[in-house]
Image: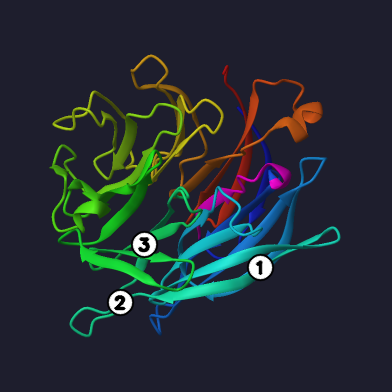
């Protein structure tokens, strides 16, 4: 592991995402969240970065926004557009378009959605997910919120459904990559659930309470069809086989709480964990086990909310000297710091 670049995001940083579109694999975003203690107002920025041929971080654009809770690129180009979704504190979700003018890149607002109110109470979006396109090419977007709801919309600004999934905050929502009708959710009520759009989200297909604290993250594997992973405040990462959801088939404790989990994009056998108070970890799941194989990042006065893999390292292989070197980004909250690492893993 080698730290090769750092950047001060000014505001506390809580999410980082590399662009999954191959031509823009050197592009990534970092979201920030700033609370003004006096006025209790929340503000933030969406920072668009590029990594140049000398492995230097370049700030391309900083978009002022409400506080940013989550950022997710669309892995698929929609009607010729590369889109980025932002879950925001201001009771709405914004979708940005990545524009290119010559050699200049920028984010411009594409559309936005207001979150529904319940009994007059506004909700704050907490996480966001893109579905895989269906047969006609259309996609839905799901977002979870602070009142326990999951809301689905499409890019035509149409509300598909909003339903109560959890008793407290719904920390995470994600789609099953192989079946876009299936949604997984996790909440502060310690429950991990699955819902099926074909059943109108009336009740969960399954509900699991194996995690002992709030379920904060979940991800479907794009290579191994039956595998999903969850993480929790209880400091455990759990691997699940959707053919038997009574209990996880393996787990590993990373300490410090788990906020985000990301599969390595090529083979999806390694997991990257943003482990809150215990920095970051890479977990090997290749043999149906869950073993920590690398740990990195400073722990003092740091809170790791964001971590992600660069999706295509081939642009940088002449600099990294090794095809086994992968690029990873992490961001930490208290010291508003964005770090980029080289890590050695054999795929």
Q: Which residue is mark 2?
A: 116
Asked whether 129 or 4 is in front, the reply is: 129
Seen in the picture, residue 38 relative to 83 is either above or below; the reply is below
Q: Which residue is mark 1?
A: 62
Residue 111 position in % (x across, y down)? 53, 73
* Closer mark to the observer between disc 2 and disc 3: 2
**The N terminus - image quarter:** top right
**First-in-chain label (3 vs 1):** 1
Asked whether 135 or 156 is in front, the reply is: 135
**First-in-chain label (2 vs 3):** 2
Q: Report the side of 67 relative to 215 (left or right).
A: right
- For the point 55% across and 65% down, the residue is 11
- Would you identify the image quadrant in which residue 281 lies? top left
Q: Which residue is mark 3?
A: 126
**Residue range corresponding to the magenta coloring:** 13-24
Q: Report the side of 91 relative to 66 (left or right).
A: left
């Amino acid at each position: 592991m080698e730290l090769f670049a750092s950047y001060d995001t000014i505001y506390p940083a809580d999410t980082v995402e590399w662009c999954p579109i191959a031509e823009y694999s050197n592009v990534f975003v970092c979201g920030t969240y700033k609370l003004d203690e006096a006025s209790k107002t929340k503000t933030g920025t969406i920072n668009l970065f590029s990594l140049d041929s000398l492995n230097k971080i370049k700030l391309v654009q900083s978009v002022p926004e409400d506080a940013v809770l989550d950022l997710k690129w669309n892995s698929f180009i929609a009607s010729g557009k590369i889109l980025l979704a932002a879950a925001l504190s201001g009771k709405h979700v914004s979708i940005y378009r990545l524009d290119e003018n010559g050699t200049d890149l920028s984010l411009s607002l594409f559309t936005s959605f207001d979150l529904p109110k319940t009994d007059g109470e506004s909700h704050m979006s907490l996480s966001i997910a893109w579905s895989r396109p269906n047969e006609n090419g259309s996609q839905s977007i799901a977002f979870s919120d602070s009142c326990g709801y999951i809301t689905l919309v499409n890019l035509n600004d149409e509300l598909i459904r909003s339903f109560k999934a959890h008793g407290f905050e719904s920390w995470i929502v994600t789609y099953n990559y192989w079946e876009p009708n299936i949604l997984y959710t996790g909440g502060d009520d310690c429950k991990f659930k699955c819902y099926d759009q074909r059943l109108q989200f009336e009740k969960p297909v399954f509900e699991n309470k194996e995690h002992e604290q709030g379920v904060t993250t979940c991800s479907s594997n794009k290579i191994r069809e039956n595998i999903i992973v969850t993480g929790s405040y209880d400091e455990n990462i759990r691997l699940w086989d959707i053919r038997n959801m009574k209990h996880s088939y393996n787990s590993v404790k990373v300490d410090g709480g788990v906020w985000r989990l990301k599969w390595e994009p090529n083979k999806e056998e390694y997991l990257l964990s943003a482990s809150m108070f215990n920095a970051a970890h890479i977990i090997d799941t290749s043999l149906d086990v869950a073993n920590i194989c690398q740990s990195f990042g400073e722990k003092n006065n740091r809170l790791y909310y964001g971590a992600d893999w660069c999706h295509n390292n081939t642009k940088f292989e002449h600099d990294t000297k090794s095809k086994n070197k992968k690029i990873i980004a992490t961001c930490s909250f208290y010291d508003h710091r964005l770090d980029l690492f080289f890590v050695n893993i054999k795929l």
